[in-house]
Amino acid sequence: MNAPQNQHQGVSVQVRGLRRSFGKQEVLKGIDLEVRAGEIFVLMGPSGSGKSVLLRHVIGLEVPDAGEILIGGESIQASGVMDKFRMAMVFQSGALFSSLTVGENVGLYLSEHRLQPPAEIARVVSEKLAVVGLKGTEAKFPSELSGGMKKRVAIARALVIDPQLILYDEPTSELDPISAVVIGEEIHTLNQRIGVTSMVVTHDRELAFGIAHRIAVINEGEILAVGSPDEVRRSHHPIIREFLHADFHREKSSL
Amino acid sequence: MFQNIGEMVLLFWRTLCALPLVWRQRAKVFEQFYEIGNASLLMICVLSFFLGGVIALQTGPLLVERGLHNAVGGLVGIAMAKELAPIMMAILIAGRVGSAMAAEIGSMRVYQEIDALRTMNINPVTYLVLPRLVALAVALPMLVTFAILVGWLGGAVVCTVTGQIDIPIQSFFTTMKDVVEVKDVANGVFKSFCFAWIIGVVSCHQGLITRGGPRGIGRSVTKAVVNSIVLIVMFDYVLTRILLH
């Protein structure tokens, strides 16, 4: 898949020598990678390989032991850089506030920062929900939504800040195949429409190869390969091959 | 508990620094205030009525036997106002409201809702802790004032209906008035104000440091209640010492 040709608003992300340990366990062992502005970059790897931890570092929820992260060429550790760029994260669980309605969840950023009057916030919320195909669900509570709808509400909440970078943490986990495809298409459509840089963490092979412009494979805190989906598919690295071709091995029983 | 004291002091300080923003969070403050009052008022009435009654029942016959009829009202009045109402209501609120705060914030922590707030540049202290603490700091002194009045009434009723004491309600309150001053009630209300901050800070802190899944939430709730009660009793002694002078 080629990067979008439209004029993008996305920002680039560079990770240099990122290291992070939790206790004696080293989770990230000197990660180096670059996400280009406006592309969909998928970080793929088995569970516990450090994908989500890396994502949490990029959004500033974790502080690295060593190394640095540059957003739009500026280190996120420098003061004011995190506020300078509009970044949003779609969490694995959706992380919607159960005590708030869908509309309040989506408009939370605008209402808490008092960026717009209530009527305007309601209009923006309705518009963003329409983008993810959930128009008219403003008054519902998250408990009334399916798993796929919650993920889409979380995406709508991310869109409210008009982001330059969206981080998706396992966007299709716990979803049925049809909902997973819908979410994948949402990510792709948003990238095409607004040119936002998208960094997607997943172990879903079909999602990764279906939407990515480039893929990185991570295992035990180390990047094994970075490249286009075709390049990654052709990789001879044994761990990548095992990950990409993992399947059931059942002997065919004679009927 | 003690290794977290520094973090709790820091949380308390950050909440104080966020106080100028409380007007913006007024809807949440009222919501919490209603939750606290609505959840606790009936229980507080029952508890304080019987608390006042039992003090009268324990001390009344002994004092009357020694010819100290006039001391019963004063004793019940002082005990309820300065000590029993503030401490018992604080313990009740720690169990009823503090546990709910720790559970709610703890589950938000576990299910990444607090991380989501941080990614939206919304300060969890301003959004979650401030409204709860302010509501508690207003509600608990009001509930304690109410508890003191109901406790006195309980003491008066028991003194009237118990044959061994047999002090009429009017006489009970007249003798109480000679002993109990407004500053004694203010003393108890002030204590409850301090206890409210302890309950709020301990419970919210436990919620914010919750790790793991449902088991972690359960552990945080238990710690919030136990630590609140321990600190309330310790601070009660310190405050009593200070207020005696």
Image (tube, coloured by chain):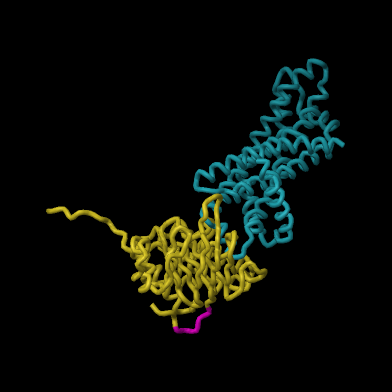
Provide the major secondary structure of the magenta segment: loop
| Quadrant in which the N terminus of chain A is drawn | bottom left
Q: Is residue B56 above or below residue B210?
A: above
x, y percent for residue A27: 51, 56
Chain A visual colour: yellow
The percent position of residue B52, horizontal first and vertical second, equals 71, 30
Q: Position of residue B111 (x, y in %)?
A: 51, 54
Numbered marks: total: 0
Report if residue A146 is visible in the image: no
User: In the displayed structure, does residue B72 sit left or right of residue A199?
Assistant: right
Q: In the image, which residues are magenta?
A: A5-9
Residue A72 place in picture, x, y as percent: 57, 75
Q: Identify the chain drawn in cyan.
A: B
Q: Residue furthest left?
A: A255
Is B98 included in the stretch rendered in magenta?
Answer: no
Residue at 72%, 38% in the rendered image: B86
Name which quarter of the figure residue B16 lies in.
bottom right
Q: Residue furthest right?
A: B245
Camera-nearest residue between A99 and A235: A235
A6 part of magenta stretch: yes
